[in-house]
Amino acid sequence: MSSSSVQALLICHGKQLQNALGLDSDRARIDVQCLLQSVMQVDRAHLLAHPERSLDEDQHSRYTDLLERRLRGEPIAYLLGLREFYGLSFKVTPATLIPRPETELLVELALQGIPPDGPFRVLDLGTGSGAIALSIASVRPAIEVVAVDVSKDALEVARENSKRLNISNVKLMQSDWFSGLIGERFDLIVANPPYVAVGDIHLSQGDLRFEPSTALTSGTDGLEDIRHISAHAKAHLNPGGWLLLEHGYDQAERVRELLNQAGYSGIFSAHDLSGIERTSGGILKMRSVNSENGEGNTKSGS
Ligand code: GLN
């Protein structure tokens, strides 16, 4: 009841979460800590330094509600409304994918190729909460980042994040991939597109059950959007510009092949912290491609 100490709640509800969701014990305890911090409005150090504290009635009822939702599997990021990514705190809602640590690789790789002082134009396709675009923009304030999403609700979240983080060099626009970008060219195009195959078992597990399927699934092989993006990005890249895509754990080879077919050179894949080839990219050869649909100049050596 409301008189239980923080310590008692951590132990008891940590175990409950562990059993209900099959989490390991550390993860389950951290989840309970996060919920407690959120309702008590304290940081982790405070929470752990005062294990004897208990919740007042209002805090207890909010905590119970959040815990029940978590026990039913709702992602902790949606319950808190926040997720850390690349050292920044992003608002997230069920309209947006929850930023994943492995996506920081895409940001790192992008930053390696962006000169510190601009001018340089980056496009982030399917920006969601804006995590990728805003992280890049925060480190490179002199460049211009355009971030698009087909979802108005997601763009609203990204807009709030740009305000909260006080980042002013990201322009947000509604666009279904390149549909709203006719005639626009960039030096770098990045995307963490949907790449899970429809029917994939992972969609019925963990956080993915609650995330927008439009941000997760992409045809029967998971590559429909990556195929579309690699074919059409060329018409929106400056000569020497590059495309960088996150993809599934087993898709690197097929993505490299798609980039090769689309005529990119310098094609590579990079490993995330788990040692998985997670992000692949290529450069548009200096000879520019003029067709808007990107069909030209597709021959390339392998
Ligand atoms: N990385 C997510 C997952 O597999 C999927 C995100 C995406 O499709 N871009 O859990």
Image (cartoon, rainbow, N blue to C red):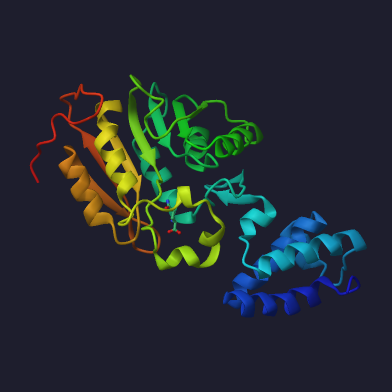
Q: Picture coordinates of residue 167 (x, y %)?
A: 58, 30
**How many numbered callouts?**
0
Q: Nearer the viewer, residue 256 or 40?
A: 256
Q: Is residue 58 left or right of residue 296?
A: right
The residue located at (86%, 72%) in the rendering is 52
| Residue situated in front as seen by the camera: 10 or 141 | 10
**Foreground: 78 or 244?**
78
| Residue 77 placement: quadrant | bottom right
Q: Is residue 47 left or right of residue 163?
A: right
Q: Looking at the rendering, in which quadrant would you find the N terminus? A: bottom right
Q: Quadrant of residue 80?
A: bottom right
Q: Report x, y in % for residue 24.
A: 57, 76
- In the image, residue 95 above or below residue 29: above
The image quadrant that residue 196 belongs to is: bottom left
* Apparent side of residue 242 relative to residue 25 in the rendered image (left or right): left
Ligand 1, what quadrant?
Answer: bottom left
In the image, is residue 238 above or below residue 229? above
Seen at 34% across and 32% down, the residue is 188
Query: Residue 191 at what x, y percent from top left?
Result: 39, 41
Observer able to see residue 177: yes
In the rendered image, residue 208, in percent from the top left (x then y), is placed at: 51, 60
Name the residue at 47% across, 32% down.
Answer: 147
Viewer-nearest residue: 255 or 143:
255
Q: Is residue 237 in sight in this rendering?
A: no
